[in-house]
Amino acid sequence: MVRPVDRCRVCGRDDWLDVLSFGETLLAGDFQDPADPPGDRYPLDVAVCRECRLMSLRHVVSPEKLFEHYLYVSSDSGLITGHSRRLVEHSVAGLGLAEGDLVVELGSNVGAQLAMFQEAGLRTVGVDPARNLAAAANERGVETLPEYFTTAAAVRVAERHGPARMVLGRQCFAHIDDVHEVLDGATRLLTADGVLAIEVPYLVELLANNQFDTIFHEHLSYFSLGTLHRLFGGHGLRVFDVWTAPVHGGSIVVFATPEASPRPTRPVVGEMLADERARGLTGEDVYRRFAARVERVRAEIGDLVRGLVAGGATVAGYGAPAKGSALLQACGLGRAEVAFCTDTTSLKQGRLLPGSRIPVCSPEEGTARRPDYFLLLAWNYAEEIIRKERRFLEDGGRFIVPIPEPRIVSAQTVTA
Ligand code: TMP
Ligand code: ZN
């Protein structure tokens, strides 16, 4: 079920700088049925490889346990769909994908992104090991193999559908232990000028904004461009462009192509690599300072919420993302402090957060129960949510935004 990481999954060295330990915690995304037993705890420690600067968990929980019945449905929020649409537009207008070209997506979830590629006239195949989600994708007409993206799966896709002009992986690469197998599969699938587009939460944002709650068992790796550049290069893939995207707390989309491909490398690649060095990502101090800030912020969030509750206020969670359950565990908050969490995902409603067994209800029920404070666990949608919940604020309700530093948002602070 769980095994320690010895050798770095990118460079193979075994020389780690320990950064943070959260002790043994419950799987953040394992929302329980009220009849379920409490669930198991697994060590949650993070370290940085001294050779290639991959930030990684020190333990891997088996993917069967994490992903085969997966409750995370990719968001249909305006922020995410806007980004998905830009990717399609760029693939056609910027990268020259033409009608009939094949796009293969790994971790394709319920097929929302691929459905947009289909509308643009492209052929698509999804690959996702979550059987419940793959079934939902197939039902909506997005062909999806309920599998891990292995070399064998990639070869089978190529045999059946021909080579791919694009292989896309959004917000799933950090979940994968054997990244070399995925890159091997991708290189076998791609045309000579094909594009591998990998979107990951950006390590620079994690460090700068104290996003410690994004550290949980599903997220094995926390990538900089530098580390991905090295990893892709080892597979004959040249990074030719990189985007920053305001999704999931700040992400990068890294575009790579076979070395001999005619696509020119944009200057932004070199600039961003230089920026990472200037920020000290190749040193050690930046990670030590991050760890010290996280220890402080964890304590401050816990103290703030406990203080409000002790003063008679009611606090509920807004959103029940996996990182929210990680945050509550890391801050020592449970049902005594947080009465319930609201979430738009129907699969989560009626379930309990792991460990704390805080119940999840619909946003409508949550708003009707009218807590004094909503702890904004889905902080990556802060702007959109605060706009949507104007009424709650105007009626005197407040949000607690936990990171980068805990702060309280009221109607006054929004209009200020
Ligand atoms: P994510 O950050 O991994 O996309 O998860 C966000 C979670 O927050 C997801 O379970 C849906 C939920 N959510 C709400 O409950 N209300 C909202 O307005 C938004 C944008 C998300
Ligand atoms: Zn390494």
Image (cartoon, grey):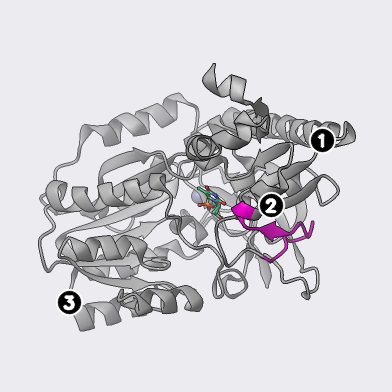
On the image, the x and y values in percent for residue 21 come to 73, 46
Which mark, residue 313? 1
Which mark, residue 48? none
Residue 150 drawn above or below residue 365: below
Residue at position x 47%, y 46% in the image = 223
Q: Which quadrant would residue 219 be assigned to in this image? A: bottom right
Mark 1 residue crowding within 10 angstroms, few (<14) / some (14–19) / many (20+): some
Amino acid type at image mark 2: Cys
Which mark, residue 162? 3
Whether ligand 1 has any atom under 8 Å from the Cβ at mark 2 is answered as: no
Amino acid type at image mark 3: Gly
Q: Mark 3 and mark 1 in contact? Answer it, CB < 8 Å.
A: no
Residue that protrudes farthest toward the top in the picture = 416
On the image, the x and y values in percent for residue 194 come to 18, 59
Residue 400 visible in the picture: yes
Left or right, 161 with respect to 253, comes to: left
Mark 2 residue crowding within 10 angstroms, few (<14) / some (14–19) / many (20+): many
Decide which of 291, 402 is in the foreground and name it.
Answer: 402
Decide which of 227, 26 is in the foreground and name it.
Answer: 26
Residue at position x 61%, y 71% in the image = 62
Does the magenta run of residues contain 208?
A: no
SS at mark 1 in the image? loop
Mark 3 residue crowding within 10 angstroms, few (<14) / some (14–19) / many (20+): some
Which mark, residue 341? 2
Residue 40 drawn above or below residue 194: below
Residue at position x 15%, y 46% in the image = 94
Amino acid type at image mark 1: Ala
Q: In which quarter of the image is the C terminus?
A: top right
Please provide the residue range marked out in magenta.
Answer: 350-364
Tell me the distance, in whole angstroms, between the alpha carbons under discs 2 and 3: 46 Å
Tell me the distance, in whole angstroms, between the alpha carbons under discs 3 and 1: 60 Å
First in sequence, mark 3 or 1: give its number: 3
